[in-house]
């Protein structure tokens, strides 16, 4: 869940053939960069609707996850992204966006 929000180092087990890699370190990401990445993917013209549907689910889950992280800009951006999809041409996206908007608003 919070793996992207904290630095992480992975060290392969000694029995695994790792090609000489001793460990891999992942940088900590701030909430805004995570939201921006998802938004960039969904804004592509070639982005299929099922990916946009998953993005809506991610927006709702991230809203809950980021609530205690102190990044008000990311939370506001997530709410705006959910509200924007409420008027989508896709009925499924509209429905999901409205449902997730209600859930996010109720959890405040």
Image (cartoon, rainbow, N blue to C red):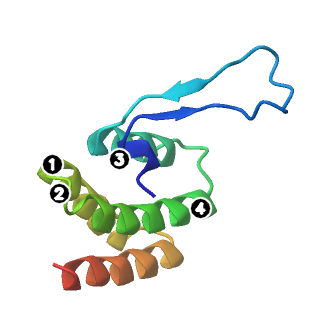
Instruction: Tell me whether circle 3 and circle 2 mark residues in contact (CB < 8 Å).
Output: no
Tell me how far mark 2 sits from mark 4, CA to CA: 23 Å
Q: As displayed, is residue 90 above or below residue 51?
A: below
Q: Upstream in the sequence, badge 1 or badge 3?
A: 3
Residue 74, compared with residue 52, is above or below; it is above
Q: CA distance from mark 3 to mark 2?
A: 11 Å
Q: Position of residue 2 (x, y in %)?
A: 40, 53
Q: For the residue labelled by badge 1, is the local secondary structure a helix, a strand or a loop?
A: helix
x 64%, y 31%: residue: 11
Q: Position of residue 76 (x, y in %)?
A: 17, 57
Which percent across, then down, holds residue 88?
Answer: 41, 68
**Can you identify the residue that label 2 sits on?**
76
Q: Secondary structure at mark 2?
A: helix
Residue at the disc numbered 4: 49
Identity of the residue furthest to the front in this view: 14
- Mark 3 vs mark 4: in front: 3
Comes first in the chain, label 2 or label 4: 4
Residue underneath mark 1: 73
Mark 3 = which residue? 35
């Amino acid at each position: 869940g919070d793996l992207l929000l904290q630095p992480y180092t992975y060290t392969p087990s000694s029995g695994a053939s790792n090609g000489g890699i001793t460990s891999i370190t992942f940088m900590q990401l701030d909430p805004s960069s995570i939201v921006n990445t998802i938004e960039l993917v969904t804004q592509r013209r070639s982005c299929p609707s099922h990916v946009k549907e998953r993005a809506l689910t991610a927006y709702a889950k991230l809203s809950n996850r980021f609530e205690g992280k102190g990044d008000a800009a990311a939370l506001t951006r997530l709410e705006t992204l959910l509200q924007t999809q409420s008027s989508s041409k896709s009925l499924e996206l509209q429905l999901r966006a409205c449902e997730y908007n209600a859930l996010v608003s109720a959890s405040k």
